[in-house]
Amino acid sequence: MKNNMVMVIALIALAFVAVSKAKAEEVFPPTKGGKSISIPSSELKFQSTGLKGEDGSEILVVDGYGDQKDSAHGTFMKFSYGFKSPAHSYTYDYYGVVIKDEMENYSPNKELVKMGPGSYWYQRGLEAHITECLSNDGCIAWVVQSQKFDAQIPPMTE
């Protein structure tokens, strides 16, 4: 009886580990065939998203892993000087880190917080917000999200 109980506990633990490992691989699949890579910033090839700020400038992106259009991803986002988005939302939460220069990411009618390199923000899904680049040289941020990056203008809310 005691051996059966130990066996059941061991099988449950093994199943938990297997499911956890499968989920981790599903969310963060290895890129480039699982090979370690190093890419200098000078070799990043930014592409248009079609998303435009109030001044007509676009957000440019490079996916570090995944694909921001349809899956979990880690993506570099480049904003030109003076970029200010209209109020918008995304279906899913995301996390952002300022890599270059100074930005703001805020909900309308809320306190503005200037964020320089290394600053971090969390953006809840289905919450209206505005993103701005405050620097003369443009801004770069790193965004991580467990689902696609689907901008909604005007914003959708809960």
Image (spheres, rainbow, N blue to C red):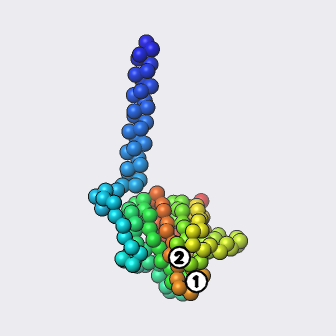
Of the numbered discs in the image, which one, if any, rests on residue 135?
1
Confirm or deny contact between disc 1 and disc 2 (CB under 8 A).
Answer: yes
Choose top left, top right, bottom left or bottom right for residue 5: top left
Q: Residues within 10 Å of mark 1 (few under 14, many from 20)?
A: some
Which residue appears farthest toward the left when viewing the image? 33
Residue bearing the label numbered 2: 100
Q: Nearer the viewer, residue 157 or 148?
A: 148
Q: In what element is the residue under mark 1? A: loop
| Left or right: residue 86 compared with residue 62 | right
Amino acid type at circle 2 is Lys
| Left or right: residue 110 compared with residue 96 | right
Compute the Cα span from label 1 to label 2. 9 Å
Choose top left, top right, bottom left or bottom right for residue 98: bottom right
Image spot of residue 135 (x, y percent): 58, 83
Q: Is residue 155 visible?
A: no
Amino acid type at circle 1 is Ser
Q: Earlier in the sequence, mark 1 or mark 2?
A: 2
- State the quadrant of the C terminus: bottom right
Q: Nearer the viewer, residue 58 or 12?
A: 12
Q: Residue at x 60, y 82 (%)?
A: 134
Q: Residues within 10 Å of mark 2 (few under 14, many from 20)?
A: many
Image spot of residue 53 (x, y percent): 53, 81
Choose top left, top right, bottom left or bottom right for residue 66: bottom left
Q: Residue at x 57, y 72 (%)?
A: 117
> How many numbered dots are placed on residues in this image?
2
Image spot of residue 71 (x, y percent): 40, 60
Q: Is residue 109 above or below residue 81?
A: above
Q: Is residue 66 visible?
A: yes
Q: In what element is the residue under mark 2? A: strand
